[in-house]
Image: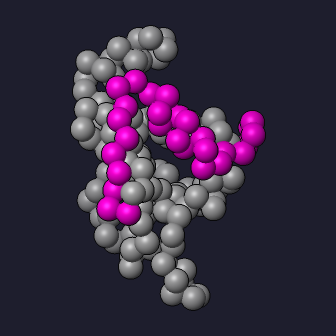
């Protein structure tokens, strides 16, 4: 892992740093980052599908991050070297989950790339193309 470890503040900073982003509030005032009215990162409230297998306690620090495709999702969740996971509740949903407490297992750069990809997967074609061209990624 290159660079400094990722932290929760990086999620907010990177998501807000993408163009045309708005922040909505979830049901418990949890932040939901959107582009064009479409969520690409959100902080999830504790739910019955994401819990500690030993204690049964619901995770209170789950972050949902969109992905471009099912292949991208599978690549992230099946790589045991990173902290991404999914639950049956998210079968068929183009997103991965990560616990905030496990973000330091990623570098800030790795987290940045995942969030940028999430934004690209949800932005309009025009916005995505403009951003990719501005960053010389096309």
Q: Is residue 60 visible?
A: yes
Residue at x 35%, y 26% (from the top left corner): 20
Task: Name the image quarter holding residue 125.
Answer: top left
Give how far across and how far down residue 30 sits, in percent.
Answer: 42, 56
Asked whether residue 44 is drawn in magenta, I would say no
Position of 5 relative to 51 (above/below): above
Asked whether residue 23 is drawn in magenta, I would say yes
> Is residue 112 shown left or right of residue 73?
right
Give how far across and how far down residue 111 sits, in percent.
Answer: 57, 42
Residue at x 47%, y 33% (from the top left corner): 16
Position of 40 relative to 126 (above/below): below
Give how far across and how far down residue 63 sits, in percent.
Answer: 47, 56
Who is closer to the viewer here, 103 or 86?
A: 103
> Is residue 76 shown left or right of residue 24?
right
Give the residue at the far bottom of this rendering.
Answer: 55
| Span of residues in magenta | 1-28
Task: Name the image quarter holding residue 50.
Answer: bottom left
Residue at x 38%, y 79% (from the top left corner): 48
């Amino acid at each position: 892992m290159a660079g400094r470890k990722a932290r929760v503040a990086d999620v907010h900073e990177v998501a807000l740093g993408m163009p045309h982003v708005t922040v909505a509030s979830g049901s418990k005032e949890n932040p939901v980052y959107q582009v064009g009215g479409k969520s690409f990162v959100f902080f999830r409230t504790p739910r019955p599908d994401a819990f500690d297998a030993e204690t049964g306690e619901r995770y209170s620090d789950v972050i949902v991050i969109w992905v471009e495709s099912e292949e991208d999702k599978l690549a992230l969740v099946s790589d045991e070297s990173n902290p991404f996971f999914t639950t049956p509740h998210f079968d068929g949903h183009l997103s991965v989950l990560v616990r905030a407490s496990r973000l330091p297992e990623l570098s800030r750069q790795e987290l940045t790339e995942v969030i940028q990809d999430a934004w690209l997967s949800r932005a309009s074609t025009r916005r995505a193309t403009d951003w990719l061209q501005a960053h010389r990624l096309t």
